[in-house]
Amino acid sequence: MAGKSLLDAFEEHTAIDKYLRTGVTVVVLAYVLLYSTVFEATYSKRLVELYSHPWFRLLLVGLVGLGAWWCPRVGLALALAVFFYFNDMHILTNKIVQSKPATA
C-alpha cells in the first residue's frame, strides 16, 4: 500500500495536540495530588450525588478509555483520578450506611 493508513495518520501529532496532552495530564495529576493527599477529601455535593448512579460510573470508565485511546499518559492519569474518586466514594458511602442505627 503506497498511501498511509488511517492508524498511521493518528501517530502524527501537531504541536497543539502535544500541548493539549501535556496540559490535560498536568491538570489531572494536579487534581489527583489535591484530592489524594487528603484522606476522605471533601467532594462537591454534585459529585457525591452522581456517584449513586451507575451510568455516571460507566461514563467515568468510558472517559478513562477515551483518554487512553487518545494518549496513554492521559489515560493513566485519568485512571488514577477515577480510582481515587471511586475509592473515596466507596469509603464515604459505606460509613454513612454503617453508621445508621439498626431498627428492629
Image (cartoon, rainbow, N blue to C red):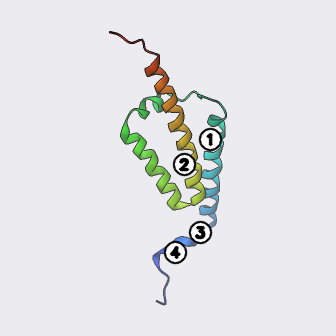
Q: Residue at x 51, y 26 (%)?
A: 92
How far is mark 2 from mark 1, CA to CA?
10 Å
The amino acid sitting under disc 1 is: Val
How far is mark 4 from mark 1, CA to CA?
32 Å
Q: Residue at x 40, y 45 (%)?
A: 58
Residues under numbered marks 2 and 4 in contact, where contact means CB atoms less than 8 Å apart: no
Q: Quadrant of residue 97 in the image?
A: top left
Per the image, the residue denoted by label 1 is: 32
The amino acid sitting under disc 4 is: Ala
Identify the disc placed on residue 9: 4
Identify the disc placed on residue 13: 3
The amino acid sitting under disc 2 is: Ala
Q: Residue at x 52, y 58 (%)?
A: 68
Given this view, does label 3 or label 2 mark the residue nearer the observer?
2
Per the image, the residue denoted by label 2 is: 79
Q: Earlier in the sequence, mark 3 or mark 2?
A: 3
Q: Going by the picture, which residue comes out furthest to the top?
A: 104
Q: Going by the picture, which residue comes out furthest to the front?
A: 104
How far is mark 2 from mark 4, CA to CA?
26 Å
Q: Residue at x 57, y 43 (%)?
A: 81
Q: Indicate the secondary structure of the residue bearing disc 3.
A: loop
Given this view, does label 2 or label 4 mark the residue nearer the observer?
2
